[in-house]
Amino acid sequence: MNRFWKWKNEVTEDGHEERSLELFGTIASESWFDDDITPEMFRSELNSGTGPVTVWINSPGGDCIAASRIYTMLSQYPGKVTIKIDGVAASAASVIAMAGEEVLMAPPAMMMIHNPATLAFGDHNDMKVAEKMLDEVKESIINAYEIKTHLPRDEISRMMDRQTWMNAKKAMELGFADGMLESTTKAVDMAAFSFASRTSEDSLKEKLVAKFSKPKSNTGREISALLQKLNSKEVSV
């Protein structure tokens, strides 16, 4: 299992110990949609302690099902949740950021929101179903942005349509962030900005290329399995 989170205990400037959660890299290489182990493991670790939690985010995004469940778990956590973005919170990672009671961004950090994307296989009816699903997924994502920013839904929708990047000050102006990190010992990984906006789609394409490039690998069973994966319409943002 590819874990994209790590728990740490940190000592604050006033000497208090604080629970710290790092969400670095792509969120969930595999969808949580049909995985009962990964989300429950995350929930168990989140609820294994008490008190405030600081969530550090430096992620290009990934699976929106995983992001939705993490957002919900953090929102329902009884202690204060502070989000600290030290690199980039893009796509699905920006949805998770909205769960913070307080969202802080490092001066060079960035946030990006855009429309959800998916891969679908089938006839024109399947494409219509996929389009309708994406519309509903977009509305669900807008719910999270709207609760945090109080911006009109149509304005948020337009921002997603044009794939909007925000520096710390812009995010604060629009309500996506509450303040700026004055200092941090965390290193900002600028390489994160080189990601493709549709991470999951690119990842699946790479798997397909690797699969079909191997000699004698195009068996009927393997092709059928790949088509079934495509037809599952996994969604990412």
Image (cartoon, rainbow, N blue to C red):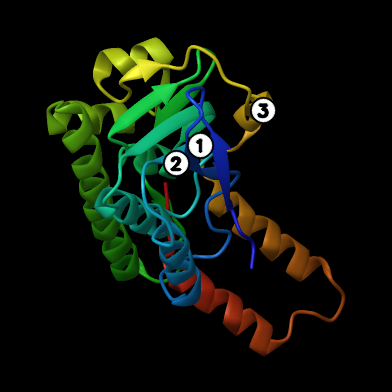
Locate residue 130, reporting x and y percent. Answer: 32, 61
The residue that mark 2 highlights is 93
Q: Who's the residue at 27% across and 12% down the image?
A: 173
Q: Is residue 190 above or below residue 201?
A: above
Query: In the visual, does 191 lie left or right of 91?
Result: right
Task: Classify mark 2: residues with Cα within 10 Å, few (<14), some (14-19) or many (20+).
Answer: many
Q: Who's the residue at 35% across and 42% down the image?
A: 95
Between marks 2 and 3, how big is the CA–CA gap?
15 Å
Q: Secondary structure at mark 1?
A: strand
Between marks 1 and 2, how big is the CA–CA gap?
7 Å
Q: Would you identify the image quadrant in which residue 224 lies?
A: bottom right
Query: In the visual, does 225 lie left or right of 149?
Result: right
Q: Who's the residue at 51% across and 36% down the image?
A: 56
Q: Secondary structure at mark 3?
A: loop
Between marks 3 and 1, how big is the CA–CA gap?
11 Å
**Marks 1 and 2: which is nearer the front?**
1
Q: Is residue 167 above or below residue 97?
A: above
Locate residue 61, reporting x and y percent. Answer: 50, 43
Task: Classify mark 1: residues with Cα within 10 Å, few (<14), some (14-19) or many (20+).
Answer: many
Q: Secondary structure at mark 2?
A: helix
Query: In the visual, does 121 lie left or right of 125?
Result: right
The residue that mark 1 highlights is 57
Residues at discs 1 and 2 in contact (Cβ within 8 Å) = yes
Q: Which mark is residue 189?
A: 3
